Image: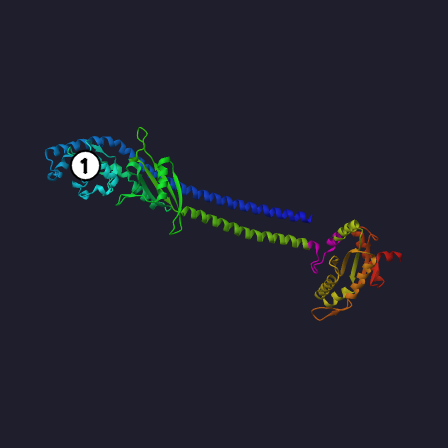
Amino acid sequence: MKNIRYIFALSIIIIVYIILLTFFYNNYENTVEIIESEYGAKHKLVEESVYNTIKYADTILGITEQQLNVEMQKKSLILLNKYSEEPDVMTWDLQALKNEIPDCDIYIINEDLKVVRTTFADDLGLDFKEFPTFSKLLDSRLQGNSFVADRLDISTNTGKLMKYSYTPTPDHKYILELSINIEERFPVLTNADIFAVAEQSTMQYPSVENVAIYKTNFGRKSILKISKSKPYYNVVMDNNKLAQIQKALKSDEVQLDNLIDKSSGNSFTHKYIPYVVNTRDGEYSWWNSYVIEVVYNNLGFNELNNQKTVFWKNIGLVTLVYLTFALLILYLLLKSEHMAYHDPLTNLPNRKLFERSINQAIVDAEKNKLKLAVLFLDLDNFKKINDTYGHEVGDSVLKEVTSRLRTNLRESDIVSRLGGDEFTILLSDIKSEDNSIEVANKINSLFQAPIKTGDNHEFQIEFSIGISCYPKDGDKSESLMKKADMAMYHAKSQQLEYSMYYDQLKR
């Protein structure tokens, strides 16, 4: 019964603790889910904003592309006619020509692929041989015989979105180039400023470290990073980044790369999002295809780690508090259990526990063919000590009696206080009744020396001892206790140091 009570109490404590842990864990999981969802939504918004800006610009420009090609070809014919009339381009009044072909700037490129004349002062002297890949393309156009218009491009000098056309002179000495500033011609395209969207995303969301745009050059020989400021095109030299961008373009799938910055030790997630355009015949359109790189720092990861730290701190605190509470409950249960079966003054087993011990000893004795004895002790004239010197002195005497008994008996012998001045002793595993007599004599000899209390009182203690034995005097705790009590009263009335119940019957 005792063990069942402990098991039940422990089970309740464990169940409540598990419920608390479950509550904290669910709260932690919900918090993590909210953080991940919040960062996920922000990141998705950034990625979609940049992607849709590129898509928007590409769609609008695709619609105007054919119209601009026709328009620029007509205006190029004006320049060709001028060249046929006046081959010395250095004498041309370019401003007058620009007035004839509004919205366009005029460039004259010589055989060395250098801009020798232009209505756009910033590009005067521009040497295309500094751009090997494009210079080869430009040289082939110089040697050609037809009008060519490029797709929309970013000017290498201004960073503006431009449309360029190229017409070689019949003698292949010059290229007559026209350019249109798309943003001035179509103001609606200011809403398609990729760099502004990228910059805004970086400023608005702390977890976004950087947004970059990449594209391939002619022939896909290298990857170029498009910048808002000079140089507007930068060749990517990082092999790892090159591999991720090329993989994104080839597979048309998002690529992820987790990297650690060596200088700071911080981790970053690089996400490569492809925007791939194919021509009507299914060919890859390198001019209009891009890769968006969004770099995320570890703010979200740090916030999740902080939540994890808070979670474990809470668990530790709850565990500590609950463990303290549980130990207190167990302590109170044990103390209550102890008080129910022990004498509060001497801490000896009380009658209930002593009888239980006798019954268990009887079971063991019967199984192993052993004998046992119960000794009933009564202090002679103890009432006189209490009445004369007070209960505090009497309690001191009882504690000293307890100390002498427990110190001088076997560990297997059980000493109990029934109340008042009555003590009982269970002697288990004895060979004969004579062993109980030896113990009775030993007890009397223990108290030949007087008991001294703290207030310098001395008392000579004497016992009247009654003895009952198993199996001769009974096989139940009640009968053995009763007969030992009867033998004790016989010893007291006869002024004997001890009396055995069996011997008493013989008299």
Residue 9 against residue 285 in the figure, above or below: below
Q: How is the image coloured?
A: rainbow
Please identify the quarter of the rendering in which residue 236 is found: top left
* Residue 250 visible in the shown view: yes
* Residue 488 seen from this side: no
Residue 302 percent location from the top left of the image: 43, 48
Q: Where is residue 422 shown, x and y percent of the image?
A: 76, 60
Residues rendered magenta in the picture: 339-356
Q: Is residue 40 left or right of residue 487?
A: left
Q: Is residue 28 left or right of residue 332?
A: left
Q: Residue furthest bottom?
A: 456
**Left or right placement of residue 293 versus residue 465 in this view:** left
Foreground pick, 304 / 20: 304
The percent coordinates of residue 366 (x first, y second) are 79, 50
**Which residue in the rendered view is the most extreme toward the right?**
507
Q: Which residue is mark 1?
A: 177
Q: Quadrant of the C terminus?
A: bottom right
Q: Is residue 226 above or below residue 360?
A: above
> Is residue 482 within the magenta segment?
no
**Direction from residue 505 to residue 218 in the image, left or right:** left
Residue 156 location, quadrant: top left
Q: What amino acid is at disc 1?
A: Glu
Which residue corresponds to the image point at 35% horizontal and 40% vertical from the top-left? 245
Which residue is located at x 62 percent, y 52 percent?
330
Q: Is residue 353 above or below residue 80?
A: below
Q: How many marks?
A: 1
Disc 1 packing (10 Å; few <14; some 14–19; many ≥20): many
Residue 228 coordinates in the image, percent (x, y): 27, 44
Secondary structure at numbered mark 1: strand
Residue 350 lies in the magenta stretch: yes
Between 250 and 298, the one lying in front of the other is 250
Which residue is at a point 56% across and 46% down the rendered structure image? 18
